[in-house]
Every structure is written in structure tokens, then in C-alpha cells.
Image: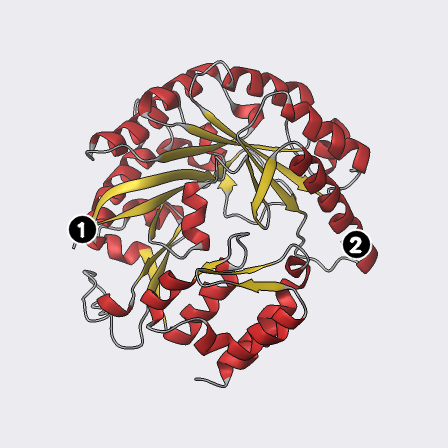
Amino acid sequence: MKKNAGLYIHIPFCLQKCNYCDFFSVKAGRFKDILSGPISPFVLRLTDDITIQAAKYGISEWDTVYIGGGTPSLLSPYDIYYLSSQIIDAQKNPPKEFTVEINPEDLAEDFLSAAVKGGVNRFSVGIQSLNDEVLSACKRRGGRKMSLSSLELLRTQKNLMLSCDLIAGLNNQTSAILKDDIETLLTFKPEHFSLYALCSNTKISDEKDDEIAELWNYGKDILEKNSYNKYEVSNFSYKNLYKSIHNEKYWRLENYIGVGPGAFGSIFFDKESLSASVNTDVHLHAQANVFALRFSAIKNIEKWMTLQNRDEVYEYETVNEKEFIEEAFMMGLRLTDGIDRPFFKSRFGTDITAFAGNTISKWLNKKAVVLTEEKFYLTENGFLYLNLFLRDLFQEIDTLF
């Protein structure tokens, strides 16, 4: 049966690595040979893989597309136009949302024009901060002047949605700096903000952790006072009108395919489809205890470019019922709207209370969660205790399997 899905395309190339970034990336200078030409070999390989993956998983149309990185804005104007237009031209209906991530210091007018002409309707701009001292401390190449110039350029395009990324807790950042960042960005009227609390691979002190949380909450309050509704742990939509449709696929555990070195994808099954086969050359079938197929593309770019059997580009794993239920809670409760109970029942054959009844009762008494006929979600205060709730929940689920 043909179906729609989201498409994530990973462009792993950067000019230099920012010290807060965990995403897979490599220095672009090492790969000039596959990034050169009228249409680069890298982009030609991407478009081939998109066609192959659509056929493999029975995808009729991509209803959302997200080109991330890395630094997608390092692609040439010819490449971004070719890549985006090939996706658009291959299907009857355009994607509801077609996003490209950009670093403001890399945006050029010809790239922007080519992307919009190709069908891109949303840009996610990695601002992180507008303060030059803060940017220098985290090894960002750009600065305030470049960022503002790029935002002005983006706003010359009509009917283009704009999302701005900020990070709370960067070195040398203060509440006054964060306030200035947000208030300056508000003059460009972005449809969407992502405000992230700084994460670190190294252990940070409790004092620093508290400082990050305080800054993040300060930024959240400014956004909410300006009509940006928090609909997910780190994401804010102007008057709830411009939620990221693609990212909601991740949180709601909906199908998405990943293409490009280091990209991830997931295909999910429900009770009604558990007897169906998945058309893959790894001979995986949706058996009684297989609820999802997850796959990740290899990070060896030379192998990714040259392997003839494109199934060998991916590593596969299956997700069983217990793991899937845990993920459904873990991801769904990131959303302010929480978990849709009828949809949950259609997936697992029973209501959420069958798996989490005791935990829900305990946290209802704490007034940290809300349970209605249609929804289960955390209160604003409950979000502060998400990890503790999940700990109790997973312990209850452990007793059932």
C-alpha cells in the first residue's frame, strides 16, 4: 500500500565544527571532488537514493522535506535547485513543508533564489546568538552583522516561513544578551523559534546547569509574552499557527526516510498492519513483535558514494512492542498537546492506561499530568519532572513484559 512520509536529507559538510554541535559533519574542503560540477556527484547520488528509498518503502509522496546538516547552505545554487525541484517534480502534490537549514554567514542571494524557485518554502536559520563575543566563544564563523543581513535577505522573499534557532546557556551569555537576541529577531517576525538549553558531552556543574535552566526559562517567558506558543519542549510557534510539520513526525513517531551520510529513518507499524511485509532486501517482515524498522546511513562518505547495493548503505534495527511503547510516551510527552489516546490505541490495541495506569494515577494526584478522553499530557509544572515521570513509567512497563 502506497503511503506518504517525511524525507530528511543530511548534508554533512561544514567549513568548521561549532563546539556545541553533536550532528555528524566533516570538513567540506576534503570533498571538493564530489561537491563540484554543474550538478555535483554528491547531489546526483542523493537524488538517486531518494528514488530508491521511495520505491523500497512504498512511498507515493513526501509530505514534508527537511534538508539539514552539517551546512546545507554550502551547496551550490545549481545543486539546491536541482535537488529540490527533482523532489517536487516527481510527485503530484508539493510537500506541505519544505525546509532548508542555513547558517546565516553562508547565505547568498543566488542560493536563496534557487532554493525558493526549486520549491523550498521554509528556512531554519541557525542564529544561536547575535552577540559577537558569545559566537566567538563557541567558534562560530559569523557575527551579528552577517546574521542580520541574512535575515533581511530572507524577508525579501514572499510567502517564506522563517524559523530561528537560539541556544540558552552559551559561554559569556547573560540574560540581557539573550533578551537583546530575541527582541532583535522579533523585528523580523519569524513564524517559529527553537530555543534550546545548551547540552554538553562533558559533565557540567549543578551551578552551570541551574544557570542554563534559568536563562532558558527567561527566554521562554519573552517568547510567550510575544504570542509564541510552546508546543514542544524547545519549540515555539507564533499563535500556534506555524508548528514544524516535519519535526512533529519525529515526536509522533510517524514515518520518515533519511537519505545522505549519517541520516536516520524510521518506518512504523500498527496492529492492523503487523501481518504485512516490508519490501526490503534485508528480508525483514513485520512479525508479531516487530513494531518499527529503524535505519541509519553509514558515515563513511566514500563508501556511501560508491556502494552499488544501496541496501548496504544502511544499518538496520527492529523495535519491539515494549521499546515502541516506551518511545511513544517519551516522544509524545515532549509535546504540549501530549499523546492522542485513540491513535495510541490504534497502534497498540489498547489504551495507555493498560501500560501506565498506576503511574498516571500517581502523577494525577501530584497535579503534574492531565488525562482526558482524547489526550494525555503534562502540565506546565509537570514538564519540570518529565524524567522522573518516565522513570516511574518505565518501571511499570517493565512489570508487563
Q: Residues within 10 Å of mark 2 (few under 14, many from 20)?
A: few
Amino acid type of disc 1?
Answer: Lys
- Contact (CB < 8 A) between labels 2 and 1? no
Q: Position of residue 308 (x, y in %)?
A: 22, 50
First in sequence, mark 2 or 1: give its number.
1
Is 97 left or right of 146, judged from the image as shown?
A: left
Q: Residue at x 66, y 52 (%)?
A: 199
Towards the viewer: 373 or 196: 373
Q: Is residue 336 at all visible to an observer of this figure?
A: yes
Q: Which residue is mark 2?
A: 210
Q: Position of residue 82 (x, y in %)?
A: 29, 26
Mark number for residue 2? 1
Question: Which quadrant would the N terminus be assigned to in this image?
Answer: bottom left
Which corner quadrant of the image does residue 340 belong to?
Answer: bottom left
Towards the viewer: 83 or 338: 338
Is 384 left or right of 54, judged from the image as shown?
A: right
Which corner quadrant of the image does residue 314 belong to?
Answer: bottom left
Q: Residue at x 50, y 86 (%)?
A: 399
Towards the viewer: 341 or 189: 341
Q: Secondary structure at mark 1?
A: loop
**Looking at this rendering, what residue extends furthest in the front direction?**
373
